[in-house]
Image: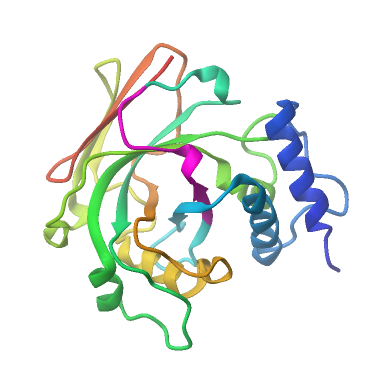
Amino acid sequence: MAIDAAAAAAALLQARHSRNWLEALPEGARPADMEDVYAIQALVAAELGPVAGWKVGAASPTAEPGCAPLHAQNLRFDAAPFHAAAFNITGIEAEIGYRLGADLPPRDTAYAREEVIAAIASMHPTIEIVDTRFVRLGLDPLSHAADQTSHGALVVGPALAGWQRIDPPAVPVRLTFNGEVAVEHVGGNSAGEPIRLVQWLANTGARRYGGLKAGMVITTGSCTGNILVRPGTKVRAEFQGVGVVETEIQ
């Protein structure tokens, strides 16, 4: 039975505007599968403005990926601080991102891995701020996925042009809060090698939005897990050989 995607989107948008966080989506409007999730996402995205990037991830190297569109208002390319009051929660994840240098529009023939690699201009260290329009995380997973997969903002670090030599699962990552190490290990992304995620996004995930476009930033899933922080936290994520990205939650 079809759900009321419009009612779900309206509830999520109202929560964003009013900051009255949701216990659940309305009856009859809760997604039953990923098709419902993407229908709700698209309705919300239409109100949030042009799509400027994507988040994509997977539970394992062989699992079907999932995605959500990102918007220019939530992308930041400097270390300017964020105010905690702008969010419901402030979770921190260190991730590896890519920026496209060429369009990958929808087409009948699937993009090969080599074509996707050729379209990527640069690799970036990124910090995702995790947020939710629900009273807390850990409720219905599909509802959280419909809620822009719990996205708050994305801080994009400096570009690495010669990125093809980097093997992300083998990259050491260090995440620090106020100079104290919170996470330090190698790899850490449950999806494993991330180019397959970008390839899936080009072939499947972004089709309803007109495909991927040059300039878009694609972040490919947490390498550190989601860690909640308090105001007064300076965040630094370092991917060895890739770069450093910093921000602050005030």
Q: Position of residue 88 (x, y in %)?
A: 61, 25
**Which residue: 57% across, 41% down?**
150
- Pinpoint residue 176: horizontal percent, then vertical percent: 28, 24
Q: Residue at x 30, y 72 (%)?
A: 116
Question: Is the residue 214 above or below the residue 156 in the image?
Answer: below
Q: Is residue 197 above or below residue 130?
A: below
- Give left or right: position of 17 versus 115: right
Picture residue at 88% right of the left edge, 48% below the top:
27
Q: Is 30 placed above or below 223 here?
A: below
Q: Which residues are magenta?
A: 68-80
Screen quadrant of the C terminus: top left
Q: x, y (%) of residue 165?
A: 11, 60
Question: Which residue ends up furthest to the top in the rendered image?
Answer: 232
Residue at 18% x, 58% y is 167
Q: Is residue 203 left or right of residue 194?
A: right
In the rendered view, does 148 fall on the left or right side of 56? right
Left or right, residue 206 beside residue 21 = left
The picture quadrant where one finds residue 122 is bottom left
How far from the left and from the top, in percent, is residue 179?
A: 24, 17
Q: Quadrant of the N terminus?
A: bottom right
Tell me the quarter of the picture where residue 191 sits. bottom left
Relative depth, front residue between 230 and 181 = 230
Q: Is residue 74 magenta?
A: yes
Number of numbered markers: 0
